Image: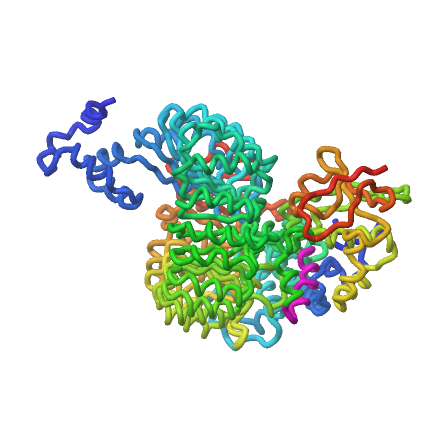
Amino acid sequence: MDPNPKRRMDSPDLSESNRFSPFPDEVLERVLSLVKSHKDRSSVSLVCKDWYNAERWSRTHVFIGNCYSVSPEIVARRFPKIRGVTLKGKPRFSDFNLVPPNWGADIHSWLVVFASAYPFLEELRLKRMTVTDESLEFLVTSFPNFKALSLLSCDGFSTDGLAAIATHCKNLTELDIQENGMDDSGGGWLSCFPENFTSLEVLNFASLNSDVSFDAFERLVSRCKSLRILKVNKNITLEQLQRVLVRAPQLTEFGTGSFHQELMPRQYTELESAFSNCKNLHILSGLWEATGLYLPVLYPACDSLIFLNLSYATLLSGELATLLSHCPKLRRLWVLDTVEDKGLEAVGSSCPLLEELRVFPMDPFDQDILRGVTESGFVAVSYGCRRLRYVLYFCRQMTNAAVATIVQNCPGFTHFRLCIMNPGRPDYLTNEPMDEAFGAVVKTCTKLQRLAVSGLLTDLAFEYIGNYAKNLEALSVAFAGSSDWGMQCVLRGCPKLRKLEIRDCPFGNAALLSGLEKYESMRSLWMSACNVTMNGCRLLARQMPRLNVEVMKDGESDDSQADKVYVYRSVAGPRRDAPPFVLTL
Amino acid sequence: MEGTLGLLGTGGGGGGGPSSGGSTTGSMSTVSKEDNLVLSSEVSSSYPDESELELGLGLGFGGGSALKAKTPPTPTPWGQYARILTAKDFPSLVGKASSSSSSSSSSSVTKANASAGTKRTADSVASAANGVSQVVGWPPIRSYRMNSLVNQIKSPTTGEFNSTIEKSRSKNGVVDKTNSGSDKNVNNAKEKGHIKTSLFVKVNMDGIPIGRKVDLNAHSCYETLAEKLEDMFCRPSTAVSARRSSFEEHDPMVEATGPSKLLDGSSEFVLTYEDKEGDWMLVGDVPWGMFLSSVKKLRIMRSSEVNGLAPRFRERNVSQRITPI
């Protein structure tokens, strides 16, 4: 199927543009095929008509950040040679149960179009989409060359769908199932991989709850020599882990099962030796129920470790400190706040190359502020890890001074997500709002792309954000602000803003409408439990026809309130599959 | 409904205060804070003038013009938060007339307020009558992670030791952590209530003709379940406050009386369950999550009636199949 004849017809002014084009289109396409970044490709397509065409013919992977911003037909029309699709569906706050079930973002209509437009589709990566077992079955029958499936935070399917994938996808290289709201009706799906199936490179079933057949699993790992990423679920015991690991020493990324079991000394040594044979291990995760007793088996493999995910291991500070002393090259670390400030001090002293730190709360609803981490842990990390650029920090208390120190130590932050877990909590030493903290962040961290604020905040914090956060792309706000002015500052002042999500803030119609011209340059706006009314939303919808303005109402509110507002740009027009509780204005 | 109280029949509030009775944080002081909060939210809704006054005292909320934070208000963080709450009802912000605490926007702030201590299995906008309900989706942690952590906090005392429990035995001063943790785990389970639905199963006890039902999803571990069952069948007159004070005071009490008797075979009765395949199994062998997915009903069986019951060792991973005679 030679695309060239088609292309000539598409661009009638080819002869003219040839005069300006220094090289033939084939060369242009070849060069462009090496451009992988979506943003770059977008820029390329805007240069001129030739480049637009060359780009669309050479694009193999398409990324759609909001599945409702475009229709599958439009995608198919523009990009004829797609092999991989990444789609994101529901608003991010659906992860926290703010979006009712059956909201939408169903993959099926996309698959139907793709079945005819891209019969040779190989990859599908979905985030926050609804995927049914029927859709998965349709997938396996429609795309004979299908290779990679990644489902993150999706819902609607069960292990039956996975069984269909395992049974029918002869060329599967990747099956990555992460943190989905799915039905787990047993581990039999894994036994569905045929005995002659050997192509698997990535397998992640860490978040599935039921037992798989260990025999089938062991055999699968043995025959898939290209396996490089393997994440098992917590039902796999240490003993079983050892048996698997010895068959896959080539792994670069490994997620263990439950890291606690009574082991005989011989078994312990065998496990340790299995880990030491893994010379290429860069990423380690899982480690449920890990304790100081068994962590030492990891030490031989820790030397090359770049990313350590301990967010399911309830480690104490000493255990963490000992472990980290073996991981000098660590760049990314996720931990639970059971390690406390003392553990974070160890992070600061052991991991000078650290770029990303995420600290999750063990007991998010615990009111006892004596537990978990405080501002001093964060400060300690900042002194030791000057290259820090990504942080997600859940704590119960914070001070303005601490944050100022932190950003002074680490001015390179690109992602700063601070969650002071009690809503509206002020600086606990001075009792002042946390405005100055985030002021310091935006003033000092000029490369800041993503910011999540918390604590007691007045409009001043948002003035700072609007004035200084010139590279900000995503902002997440909850229980903050004093008036419309706050939101107006942000909308007016942040030129690169793409995603704005707000909940429980006193921002109303004036704030909403001040962004009239901005929303088309953004991916989406979410406002829930704010002071926006239906009339305000209707006004917005009327003025901006290329935006979809959707409102979801809570059962008990009065008619004029717009409880949950979701605004996004779209070239596909209003949703045709909106459920009754989603009102498109 | 009020399954959170864990009471029999009479449901209702042995615990102090209205809505706050639902809280099982095990901290009495929290209860009183909540009472204050509840009052202030009600005050704000019924007396707008007073709410304005509160605003004046507070951080200069509302009023349209950009107000800088003035001298910070004194009191507790909760007191401060009450002022934020009132701003929501302040009409000048948007011209919304509603100021009743049952309107969803203010109630979600009320909810935020209530994150102080009240945990409920209510849906997101519920219990407006009591003025206190729980905050949906806060702190922002994905459900998968929340469920996973809670199940981990208390895994059954068989093969997989709960690392926290283990640590509590070896380290000083952490005992509190584990034991009061059980309280919080029940809370966490209840928090999950708004994510999960209830899972009521029948419970019968040998020698008692009338059976009961228990919500398994209100628990996150075998210990609390066994305790609940003991309360149901052995101590029908236990009042909430008594139970709560028992949580308060006591570590030894929890260890001695509670769960161990039904779970470790030291009492005259043994806790068993019927699984999906129709077999009767001993409760406690498999991880909690696995138990939840296979249990159909429970039976508190006389030890003498169990055939083939062997003393249960903590380390054992293999479930025992038992045949009731």
Report whether A377 appears left or right of A143.
right
**Can residue B98 be seen here?**
no
Q: For this view, does A274 lie left or right of residue A81?
A: right
Observer-nearest residue: A119 or A50? A119
- Specify the quadrant of the image occupied by residue A228: top left
Percent position (x, y) of residue B29? 70, 70
Front residue of A297 and B182 = A297
Q: Main secondary structure of the magenta part?
A: helix
Q: How many marks?
A: 0
**Figure check: B176 above or below B317:** below
Q: Which x, y percent locates residue A468? A: 35, 64
Identity of the residue drawn at 43% across and 62% down? A326
**Vertical placement of A326 versus A280: above or below?**
below
Q: Can you name the residue that lies furthest to the left here?
A: A19
Residue B179 falls inside the magenta stretch: yes
Q: Is residue A261 left or right of residue A450?
A: right
Viewer-nearest residue: B28 or A442: B28
Q: Position of residue A80 (x, y in %)?
A: 30, 29
Q: Is residue B215 visible?
A: yes
> Where residue A348 sits: x, y (%)?
43, 68
The image quarter in which residue A332 lies: bottom left
Q: Residue at x 65, y 71 (%)?
A: B172
Direction front: furthest residue: A266
Residue A328 counted in the magenta span: no
Examine the image and state in which quarter residue B261 appears: bottom right
- From the image, which quarter does the N terminus of chain A lie in? top left
- The residues colored magenta run B171-187
